[in-house]
Image (cartoon, rainbow, N blue to C red):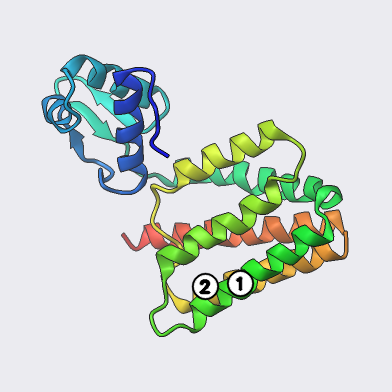
């Protein structure tokens, strides 16, 4: 379904944000207002307003005499994001235990089996697995019975999309699938603390992989 925007500023904001998160606008890239206005078929006013909002949210920096620059990735920023994600996602998993039925657990198991097929295919689909990984966690967190927690987690997750993709080798996929299985087993045992601890470890490993990747850039 086509997204409806209330204003031109909202449309431009959403479009620029998406292009930053998917890497179309790279960290450090200058965003020229006149070019963006042409790209989105609007005047420069909504572009300026959108960039102001993106600046407040940390997606861009407004540099005097230069203009808008896509924010540079930093270890400090990643640390802040993942400190929140690690504990919030562990909490969401813990809270979900009492609300996940056997039917839900069976669906999670099917997701894992489907991800194994990606691993054994001749052309390992890393981008597709990243979507699958999010779907797995999203399914769990959706049942945490805390809509604010759920919303914050995926606002942080969306922001994290602008970082290098951690699923880039068959080994990273294999390890992720193994850890998903461990989380599911804890959920099946209805052990909330164990499920939370395994989620915490799973996310912390992702954080370490990302840091290692950034050091190689």
Position of 94 relative to 189 (above/below): above
**Residue 167 shows up from this direction:** yes
Of 205 and 88, the residue lying toward us: 88
Task: Tell me if residue 80 can be seen.
Answer: no
Residue designated by label 2: 173
Quadrant hosting residue 85: top right
Where does residue 57 sit, x and y in percent of width and height? Answer: 42, 27
- Image x and y of residue 192, in percent: 84, 54
Q: Is residue 40 above or below residue 75?
A: above
Residue tagged 1: 177
Q: Are marks 1 and 2 in contact (CB under 8 Å)?
A: yes
* Spot occupied by residue 8 in the image (x, y as percentages of width and height): 29, 20
Q: Relative to 110, is 25 on the left or the right? A: left
**In 3D space, how far apart are the residues under numbered discs 1 and 2 (Cα atoms)?**
6 Å
Q: Residue at x 34, y 17 (%)?
A: 7
State left or right for residue 167 relative to residue 153.
Answer: left
> Residue lying farthest front?
1
> What element does badge 1 sit on?
helix
Q: Residue at x 49, y 66 (%)?
A: 129
Q: Which circle marks residue 154 in the picture?
A: none
């Amino acid at each position: 379904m086509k997204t409806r925007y209330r204003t031109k500023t909202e449309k431009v904001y959403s479009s620029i944000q998406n292009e930053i998160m998917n890497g179309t606008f790279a960290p450090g890239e200058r965003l020229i207002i006149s070019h963006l206005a042409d790209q989105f078929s609007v005047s420069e006013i909504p572009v300026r307003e959108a960039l102001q909002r993106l600046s407040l949210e940390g997606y861009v920096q407004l540099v005097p005499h230069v203009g808008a620059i896509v924010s540079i990735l930093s270890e400090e920023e990643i640390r802040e994001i993942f400190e929140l994600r690690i504990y919030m996602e562990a909490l969401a998993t813990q809270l979900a235990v009492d609300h996940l039925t056997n039917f839900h657990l069976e669906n999670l198991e099917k997701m894992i089996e489907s991800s194994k097929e990606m691993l054994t295919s001749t052309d390992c689909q890393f981008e597709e697995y990243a979507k699958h990984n999010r779907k797995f966690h999203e399914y769990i967190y959706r049942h945490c019975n805390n809509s604010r927690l759920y919303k914050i987690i995926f606002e942080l997750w969306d922001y994290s999309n602008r970082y290098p993709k951690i699923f880039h080798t068959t080994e990273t996929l294999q390890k992720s699938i193994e850890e998903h299985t461990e989380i599911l087993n804890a959920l099946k045992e209805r052990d909330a603390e164990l499920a939370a601890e395994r989620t915490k470890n799973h996310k912390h490993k992702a954080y370490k992989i990302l840091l290692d990747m950034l050091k190689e850039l």
